Amino acid sequence: MTFEPAALQYAMDALEPVIDARTVEIHFTKHHATYAKNLNAALEKHPELFTWTLEKLVSSLDKIPEDIRTAVRNNGGGVYNHNIYWASLAPRQSGQPVGELSKAIDSTFGSLDIFKSEFEKSALARFGSGYCWLSRKKDGQLVIHSTANQDNPLQENMIPILVVDVWEHAYYLNYQNRRADYLSQWWKIVDWKSANDRYLAAV
């Protein structure tokens, strides 16, 4: 079974004006799709790996044959990370966390405003390309952290709850080099219900 990007749950123009339709189209049909294509091409050299889940591929890199390990890390991570990113978004959101995740954010960070400030600070500090995550450690603790390129929380033994893509292709058409503006607007389309569902599943 080959790997494909998870389908978008909304129209490509649904995230406007925060993220424009053209950016979503390029990001999803070009960048995300290319990661899947390249992952499948790499796995053809070791077809037994097609029986693995995407999560197992990107979290068990030491078990991947060396000749395709880098390709799986980059492209498998590209598929996985984008799947979580698109699932973290939805049009016309309230901007407020919900459920048990809301309680966990307040108890861990003190308030939503403090959490958002720390999250944006981490996302801005990521030099070059990568992601900023809210993840759950095995002991239940919520942490804000960033990863470079297509690395992800599974490789650090954590479960991803929420993620923002800070590769320039995620925001450049609207925001050019203004990553801070992208991040401040991004909260308007965060799907907190989806994030809460991932949090509950991790618990």
Image (cartoon, helix red, strand yellow):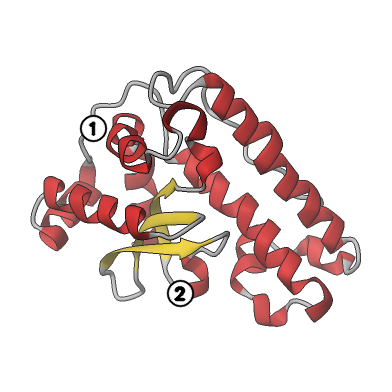
Q: Note whether 44 is above or below 93 in the view shown.
A: below
Q: Quadrant of residue 33?
A: top right
* Secondary structure beneath label 1: loop
Closer-to-camera residue (135/177): 177
Amino acid at circle 1: Gly
Residue 141's label in the rendered image is: none
Q: Which residue is mark 2?
A: 157
User: Residue lying farthest right?
Assistant: 45
At 13% across and 46% down in the image, what residue appears?
A: 113
Q: Residues within 10 Å of mark 1 (few under 14, many from 20)?
A: few
Front residue of 35/44: it is 35
- Marks 2 and 1, how far apart in space? 28 Å
Give whichever of discs 2 and 1 has the lower sequence position: 1
Residue in the image at 72% along x and 65% along y: 72
In the picture shown, does residue 52 fall above or below 124? Answer: below
Q: In this orientation, does residue 12 appear?
A: no
Observer-nearest of 153 and 51: 153
The residue under the point 83% across, 61% down is: 42
Rendering coords of residue 116 (x, y %) = 21, 48
The image quarter in which residue 97 lies: top left
In the rendering, at what x and y percent does residue 34 appear?
74, 44
Residue at left offset 55%, top offset 28%: 23
Image location (x, y in percent) of residue 27: 60, 35
Q: Is residue 89 visible?
A: yes
Whether pointer 2 and pointer 1 mark residues with C-beta atoms closer than 8 Å, the reply is: no
Q: Amino acid at mark 2?
A: Asn
Give the labeled residue for mark 1: 95
Q: Quadrant of the C terminus?
A: bottom left
Q: Is residue 63 left or right of residue 155?
A: right
Q: Residue 53, percent across and down?
A: 67, 60
Q: Secondary structure at mark 2?
A: loop
Q: Residue furthest front?
A: 177
